[in-house]
Image (cartoon, rainbow, N blue to C red):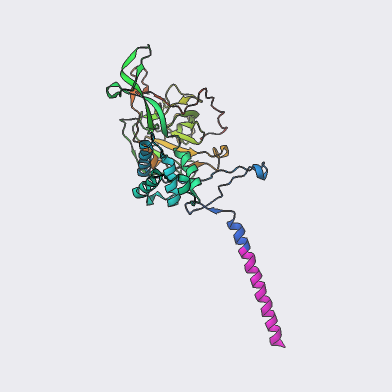
Amino acid sequence: MNLFNKDIRLSHVSRHHIIIYIEVIILTFLLVSLFFISPGGKLSFPVVNQDSNASPSEAKKFIKWVDFDVTARAMQEAFRYDVNTCQSEPHLNWVDLLAYLGAKYGGDFSRYSTKDLDGLAEQLLSGKTMEELTAKMTHYSYYREAYGAVLDGLVGQYDIQISSQNAPLYATPALLPDGTQDPDKVWVKKYGLKSFSPIAKGFPYNDFDDFGVARSYGYRRQHLGHDMMGQVGTPVIAVESGYVEAIGWNQYGGWRLGIRSFDGKRYYYYAHLRKNYPYHKSLSQGSIVTAGDVIGYLGRTGYSRNENTNNINEPHLHFGLQLIFDESQKEGNNEIWVSCYELTKFLSMNRSETLKNQETKEYNRVYDMTDPGIPDNFIPPDPPKAEN
């Protein structure tokens, strides 16, 4: 009888354990469902952000994190395919190519091989479509949107002045302010890289991959930009056409400029500009700039609540790039800053030539450019309340 009761008790305990195990499994599943595994295989927060005031049908969805790992070599080689096919059919879009490779590599471009790019291009040139090739790629659309946010504004058609010594037959004469023909310059229409390095042509700089390293001024944080070490007074160049969204003093960045792309997706941050003379005199909040314009001068201001203070030990430009998929990301905990080291290596292919006006001491670009990406009669939106 005692043995029988013991068996009953053991059976009851076993059932109890099974119930506990099931509850633990269910709880674990619910916790994991709060997260997702990113296309790169990293644990991250969901890419879906919901407006707490919106109904489920009105909930907004947008990307909440981007690791931009594309190498300068991959960008250069994809860019060449884009330019070489710009007047043919099919025209290979360089961002499409890179997005395909991003989906293939899970975002890890240390795996990049020219053979993979060449093989993709060969299939597209033989008649295959990107839709066909990516039909079974779960994350291609993510990489296209993410990489497009970084790169879509950098390549396209534009008009630019060049030296008349290099003028092709189809060039248009450039005019001087008095209406006479400029003997030294002509206008040509081009397709290609219409964005520029942040450092003017002919001015030396040093850099290394410093994105994410520790910073301690004010509070412990990561370095969310790219430092380009140079000489005080080096002309700083607008990478892309846009409008001045932020200008003035910031205790971390010193004299800084924030320029927003016209599609709203990119916010370029130029910081630690020169003491006493940080900006080109033509700029104010809301000013429209063209890619290649001189916007300011390299310095070492910042790390102080007192304006116009040099507290940065080594003169350099802090160049940052923030991606914005929704305006709620512009300021706060949902900001997306990407590494610019490989991007600046790529942009070094195109550096704006500048000349100093000895009377005003101001630098200006030598060759003007007309960017069709600048909207007609553009009115800048009101700036955000808090600015980087």
Q: In the image, is 217 to the left or to the right of 50?
A: left
- The residue under the point 31% across, 31% down is 203
Name of the residue lying farthest toward the front: 127
The count of marks equals 0
Residue 277 % position (x, y):
41, 25
Q: Is residue 242 above or below residue 183?
A: below
> Which residue is outermost to the right?
1
State which quadrant residue 89 falls in: top left
Q: Picture coordinates of residue 31 (x, y %)?
A: 60, 57
Q: For residue 14: magenta?
A: yes
| Residue in the picture at 47% in, 40% down | 148
Q: Residue furthest left?
A: 165
The residue stretch that appears in magenta: 1-25
**Magenta part mainly helix, strand or loop?**
helix
Q: Is residue 356 magenta?
A: no
Left or right: 374 in relation to 367? right
Asked if residue 204 lies left or right of residue 133, the reply is left
| Residue visible at 71% across and 87% down in the picture | 2
| Quarter of the rendering occupied by the N terminus | bottom right
Of the pair 325 and 370, the residue shown nearer to us = 370
Residue 16 appears in the picture as rendered = yes
Please identify the quarter of the rendering in which residue 300 is found: top left
Above or below, comparing residue 205 to residue 126 in the picture: above
Percent across and percent down for residue 175 are 36, 15
Q: Is residue 274 visible from the viewing direction of this image?
A: no
